[in-house]
Amino acid sequence: MGLKLHGSKFSTCTQRVLTVLAEKGVTDFEIVSINLPAGEHRREPFVSMQPFAKIPVLEDDGFFVYESRAICKYIAAKYADQGTQVMPSTSDLKAFGVFEQGCSIEHSYFDGPASKIGWEKVFKQHKGAGPADEAKVAEYVADLESAFAVYEKILSKQGYLGGNEVTLADLFHLPYGTLIQSVGFGSVFEKYPSVKKWFDSLQARESWKKASVPAGGPPGKPQANGKP
Ligand SMILES: N[C@@H](CCC(=O)N[C@@H](CS)C(=O)NCC(=O)O)C(=O)O
């Protein structure tokens, strides 16, 4: 039986998983659309799958796993023998350690400021929660720049955040990195040449071209998304 991805193609976190499915060459799956504006994620049967009421959730033959990064690692492990090797095996302990370090860097120093910029500049308006707080945006952009200054040091020595090959640690950046570029913060990347080159190479991947649609849906037409 194929996989079911409960989510929305307009959601950044669902796009993270769709990118990895494409990298692994997994085609036997269906997206079960969850309508966020209608609040489907806050009701049964969704909350029995994801008690924090967030998309996406992966269903694999009666087994459920949520949190997009955990889902991506599950897919990488399940389909270890096919597609891009996006996660080193624990048999190469040092490679695995650097990979996990890269994943933690993304979650600890990138996701916070990037998703908060996304909230202020995109999702807040979609939810009718008022205009962006530009003072907060400036603060998040400064945080992102501080993180990218360190990324620049790392990426001037190695091709990718999790080592010399592309891994999940890199791919995890795609949805929010692309979103913040689309709302006028491309200059944050341009300031750091190795970061810019690295991110351009990620966006050029076929997997991302397949998975990416404007997060939140077309401008002026709220869709199934909304990072809190
Ligand atoms: N850490 C979670 C975050 C999931 C998340 O925030 N999903 C958003 C869509 S990208 C959502 O469900 N928002 C609906 C809401 O908060 O009401 C993950 O990576 O899966």
Image: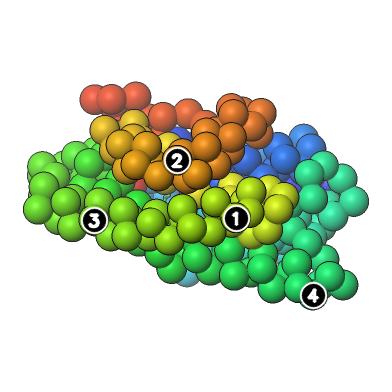
- Among the two numbered marks 2 and 3 on one chain, the one whose residue lies closer to the N terminus: 3
Looking at the picture, does residue 95 appear above or below residue 118? below
**Pointer 4: what residue?**
93
Q: CA distance from mark 1 to mark 2?
A: 12 Å
Which residue is depicted at the point 47% across and 45% down?
Answer: 195
Q: CA distance from mark 3 to mark 4?
A: 35 Å
In this rendering, which labeled residue sits more in front, label 2 or label 3? Answer: 2
- Quadrant of the snapshot with the C terminus: bottom left
Nearer-the-camera pick, 39 or 92: 92
**Pointer 1: what residue?**
157
- Among the two numbered marks 1 and 4 on one chain, the one whose residue lies closer to the N terminus: 4
**Pointer 2: what residue?**
193
- Among the two numbered marks 3 and 4 on one chain, the one whose residue lies closer to the N terminus: 4
- Among the two numbered marks 3 and 1 on one chain, the one whose residue lies closer to the N terminus: 3
- Residue 193 relative to residue 64: left or right: left
Q: CA distance from mark 1 to mark 4?
A: 20 Å
Which labelled disc corresponds to residue 142?
3
